[in-house]
Image (tube, grey):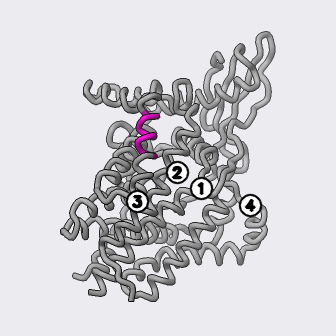
Amino acid sequence: MSMPAIVLVVAVLAALTARRSLGGGLLGRLRALLPAWRFFDAIEPTPRLCVRVIRPGDSPGRWIDVMPKPKGGFFLASDRNLVLAMYALVERLVSSDEDAPDAPGIAVTYAQITELARERARLELGDSGLFQWCITDHQGARLERARSEFLPI
Amino acid sequence: MIAFDATSASELIARLAAIPTAIAALELLQVRASWADGGAWGWSILRRELDGAPRWLMVLCDRTLGAAGFTAVLAVQVASAVVLPWVDSPWPAATAWACALLCAFRFRGSYNGGSDSMLLVVLGGLALARGDRAGVLETVGLAYIAAQLVLSYFVAGAAKLSQPSWRSGAAVHQLLSLPQYPVPNCARRWLGTDAAVRLCAWGVIGFECLFPLALVSDYAAIVLTAIAIGFHVVNVVVLGLNRFLWTWLAAYPALAYVRLVLIDS
């Protein structure tokens, strides 16, 4: 069998194989070695991470979008790629692909998102007060996917 | 006819791969606050997922993936990128590969999605090729890069073809409306009609699905490579995917080698 034929057979088999999650833990952390290459196959609305704060002796404020606007350049785009990583993190919490509900990965993702929200809340509050984050979908009606407790800044 | 052999393919890959290798590390150094202690990707949070791992592994991870250790890993990656084009040895590519893998491991699988994977493919294949000059592993390393390059387009195209939203063009509308991509207003205007998004969607599906033809014909290889470079440049401008351009570009000499040397001969 010639090389182009081999590559074509492998490519067709790879394309027909459903995407499988490697879960969290050690194996999931090595998934960059096993690329899926299914870029933008199913495009879902992006979940939004919002935060609200309570100043001491006050009631909860309005929900504020945590994610900054992406910007960057042709060569170096560190801020933009950080924003992409932030969105990927939020998607990871609300999608069931990555981790089983009781996996330690969920708790880690939850803690990471709490840190993202805390950073944004600190801009509003300074160093005292409480904050709460929520993740919403924008599919017609606003659908809430996850919400934290009120947490100390 | 330009003389093109495995050595010149490896040299070209090394020169081109130095760019995304350096970019990946420099970008992370620029956002150090996000992965230093107290950041959302701080090691004190990320290490919890490895609870239960062998003690020696935890000690190794704590040393290399904590804020100080990981800064050193990224510095080594930048240094490897600098010497990659100039030192004819497998070690710079192998070192950069190890740093890139540590980075993906630290960020729970990947930091920048597919570009992390392709960087590992290119650096791994290059290390293999440079470690066995004129030997079988040189061919294997370059063929591996070329095969993954072809797969990356074909699998993406076939996956899109199976989606009704891509066939109707609706997926392009959806993609442009995602808040994480800095789509310029002019791109939104150009793709403002149903006909334009359908044309764009079928253009992408057609190009990606037909990419394996680059292996069977010189003309197809030239045309598809030119389209691919344009495709990646547009992705930088429209979606901001800067790393994908430089990483995929570094894989193309392997495709040229496989097409011109392995298949033609």
Q: Position of residue B4 (x, y in %)?
A: 35, 79
**Quarter-of-image position of residue B238:** bottom right
Q: Reply yes or no: does residue B158 show up in magenta.
A: no
Mark-to-mark CA distance, 1 and 2: 7 Å
Q: Which residue is mark 1?
A: A75
Task: Determine if residue B82 is in view.
Answer: yes
Quarter of the rendering occupied by the N terminus of chain A? bottom left
User: Quick check: marks 1 and 2 in contact, CB under 8 Å?
Assistant: yes
Q: Which residue is mark 2?
A: B23
Quarter of the rendering occupied by the C terminus of chain A? top right
- Mark 4 or 1, which is nearer the eye? 1
Q: Position of residue A52 (x, y in %)?
A: 73, 27
Mark-to-mark CA distance, 4 and 1: 18 Å
In this view, the residue farthest toward the left is B135
Q: Position of residue B166 (x, y in %)?
A: 58, 69
Q: Which residue is mark 4?
A: B184
Q: Which residue is mark 3?
A: B85
Mark-to-mark CA distance, 3 and 1: 18 Å
Residue in the picture at 31% in, 61% down = B125
- Mark 4 or 2, which is nearer the eye? 2
Q: Secondary structure at mark 1?
A: loop
Q: Secondary structure at mark 4?
A: loop
Q: Provide the residue span drawn in magenta.
A: B70-78
**Mark 2 belongs to which amino acid?**
Ile
